[in-house]
Amino acid sequence: MFTSDRQAATGDETYKWTGNEFSDLFLADLQTNDVQPFDNQLNTPTNEGTATFNKPANELYFTRCYGDKKEDNFCKIMSSKWDGNRWTDPTALPFQQNGVNYGHPALTADGNTLYFSSNSKDGWGGYDLWSSERQGELWGEPKLLPRTVNTIGNEKFPWLDGDTLYFASDYHPGMGGLDVFKTYKTAAGAWAPVQNLKPPLNSGFDDFAYVVDYQAKRAKDVLQVGYFSSNRPDGSGNDDLYRFERRIPPPEPVKPVAEYKLKLEGYVLEKIYTEADNPDTKLLGRKPLNGANVEVKFGKEVKKFTVAEDGFFSMDLAENTDYQFIATKNGYLTGETFFSTKGIGKDPSNPVQTFEVEVVLDKIFLNKEIVLEDIYYDFDKWDIRPDAQPTLNALARNLELNPKIRIQLSSHTDCRGNDGYNAELSQRRAQSAVDYLVSRGISVERLSAKGFGESVPKANCACARCTEEEHQLNRRTTFTVLEGL
């Protein structure tokens, strides 16, 4: 399957950006070189392309760019299922926002993680790579891949080969234009420093959309066969498809032993909200936190840094070592993160590897109610459910890191039920949260519980007309910092 704007594409209009037809999905028989449009249910007079299937090949994800009078609009990732006779009408994945371009979907082998590119303003700049985890029949909120992978330039066309991620970038050091890079997940779950695939696959032109064909026949000395796209000048015109083979190389002459180094670049950041003094408004992004102090603990050693306006610090790392990073600044809650060099192998082609960590500090908002996400209770009950424990465990750890703050745990109900019952139920729920934190070693003197019943709704609606979403918004558990440095 491939994308083409050849004359056989659907529709009679011309796409102004290329002067050709709008693009469609096509199938090619590599034995006969016969090419046919993929499916008229999916191909339309607008642009379609960059498709990916799950392993049983009964789910299809692809990009569709809607056009209006031959002008660009926005691209979305569409999904369709094979019902045994036909592909269903494609629908856009629901997490996509208006006014943002999404494209180049790629599924992991188990079908549970979807990678894609997007130019969301919440990214690092240009197009970035994001991932979404399957949650039942739906896809979860997208997560931005770290700056090990993403840059202020454009990262596009992800493709997965086991734990290895291939993608194209025009900003990572390369040959020119878009180049194909690869990275992989380390044993600690972080993305390793990216590697350029270099010539002859990469050139001074745009090279992208790298895939491997495991069904292709190959000679004994061929390790891998695959395809990629390029607009290099020896093609037929515009973007062409190329076939590549990875062969077993001849023995190389003995080289001096490389000096291996592991380096770390760290950033201390703070959150940016729509309303600067309201942590329950929309999170817009993060920015460097000037003047924060960082303490790095590893083994019996400790290193200390004070960051400047860029929030940046760096250090050399030792092999097979666990690191803890604790960041502090007056007026902010102490924060921490971890990194480990255990399981990171030595790569002769890349002897100096650089990794990145971020510590995000939360500003102390005295007497401001902050909603605890994922704290839910069964109907007419107040005990802490297992799915609420991770959130409360994180809060307990935050209190351990910030021993001088006191907080109030508050619980609210929706408007259904009488006032007295709701007040008593919310008080029991707030007290359950306090009791759980005490069980995690937090002093009861630092905690208080208060149930507000239905008296302080967050969604202000007439009770009989409230939607289920508004009722859920009002059934919340929050914490408020009463005292802090």
Image (cartoon, helix red, strand yellow):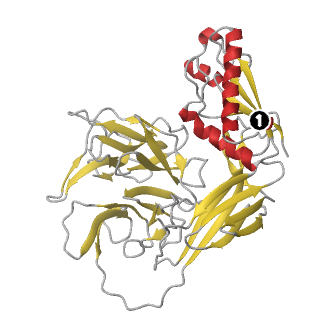
Residue 221, how many percent across, how many down?
23, 77
Taking the spot 28% from the left edge, 36% from the top edge, the residue there is 41
Residue 88, how many percent across, how many down?
30, 32
Query: Is 60 placed above or below 263 here?
Result: above
Taking the spot 71% from the left edge, 46% from the top edge, the residue there is 398
Taking the spot 74% from the left edge, 16% from the top edge, the residue there is 455
Residue 129, how many percent across, how many down?
50, 53
In the picture of the structure, the residue carrying the numbered disc 1 is 444
Q: Which quarter of the picture shows residue 328?
A: bottom right
Residue 172 shown left or right of residue 314 in the figure:
left
Residue 123 shown left or right of residue 453 in the figure:
left
Residue 23, how many percent across, how many down?
35, 48
Instruction: Tell which of 248 and 380 is nearer to you.
Output: 380
Query: Is 388 placed above or below 72 here?
Result: above
SS label for mark 1:
helix
Query: Is 283 placed above or below 358 here?
Result: above
